[in-house]
Each structure stands twice: as C-alpha cells, then as structure tokens.
Image (spheres, grey):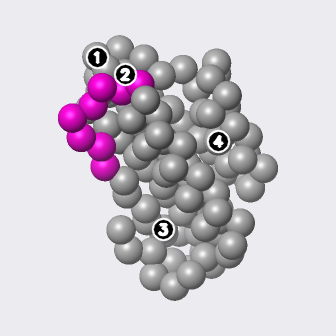
Amino acid sequence: MEVGQRLPEQLEVAAYYIVSESLANVGKYAQASSASVAVSRSDGQLLVEVVDDGVGGADGESGSGLRGLADRVAALGGELDVVSEPGQGTAVRATLPHDNPNE
C-alpha cells in the first residue's frame, strides 16, 4: 500500500471513508474469512480497493452506506464500482482523480 507523498486532504478523507465503510460492511454482512485493502496511485488517479471472499450480493443502489460512498466519490470527480455476485464475494473499487498526473 504505497502512495508516496501525502494527498490532498479531501482525497485522504474519502479514502478513509471508503475503506472504513467497506470493512464495516464486511464485518456486518459478508460472512467473509478474509478481506484485503489496496491503495495505489498512478497516471493522476488514486485507486482504493477493498475485496472480500464473503457471500456477495451487496447492492450499491439500495443501502445507504454504499450509496453514500458513491455520492462522496462522485463529488470528487471519481467513480465507485461495486462488484458483488452472490457467492463470489465483494469488491469495492473507487477511482479518484488527484492533482499530480505525473505519478
């Protein structure tokens, strides 16, 4: 999980909430035996990814937590993708633009 130097505060806060909400969902609903968190940046993008091996079936459109994350990410010009097929676990991926496109 190497991102180099500090990011603008709004990106750090968004990354914190993405990880926090995603891991809270893993603990509450996923029945997972493991979860991973990855944070990276390149080409002017910050990627925050939380993946679990749980029961899947998360719906990014219905629950307030994932919908709130999507709104927060969109407000920063980013995209949130939730992939959660039943029985296949869940992957929450947020891509956020940041100010230094040379990384």
Q: In the rendered structure, which disc, 3 or 4, sits on the residue that comes first in sequence?
A: 3
**Disc 3 residue type?**
Arg
Q: Mark 3 packing: few (<14 Cα in 10 Å), some, or many (20+)?
A: many
Q: Is residue 85 visible?
A: no
Of callouts 1 and 4, the N-terminal one: 4
Earlier sequence position, callout 2 versus callout 1: 2
Residue furthest to the right in view is 75
Identify the element where label 2 is drawn.
Answer: loop
Q: Which residue, given by chain and number where applicable, does mark 1 sit on?
A: 87
Question: How crowded is the residue under tag 1: few (<14 C-alpha within 10 Å), some, or many (20+)?
Answer: few
Checking the image for residue 69, the label placed there is: 4
Q: Which residue is mark 2?
A: 56
- The amino acid at mark 4 is Leu
Of 55 and 99, nearer the camera is 55
Q: CA distance from mark 3 to mark 4?
A: 19 Å
- Given contact means CB atoms under 8 Å apart, are the residues at marks 2 and 1 in contact? yes
Local crowd size for mark 4, using a 10 Å CA cut-off: few (<14), some (14–19), many (≥20): many
Is tag 4's residue or tag 2's residue first in the polypeptide sequence?
A: 2
Q: On the image, which quarter does residue 60 sit in?
A: top right
Tell me the element at label 4. Answer: helix
Kindly report the distance in space between the C-alpha atoms of the residues bearing marks 2 and 1.
5 Å
Using the image as rendered, state which of residue 40 and residue 54 is in the foreground: 54
Tell me the residue that label 3 is attached to: 41
Considering every residue shown, the one lying at the far bottom of the view is 5
* Residue span colored magenta: 29-36
Query: Dot 3 lies on which element?
Result: strand
Quadrant showing the N terminus: bottom left
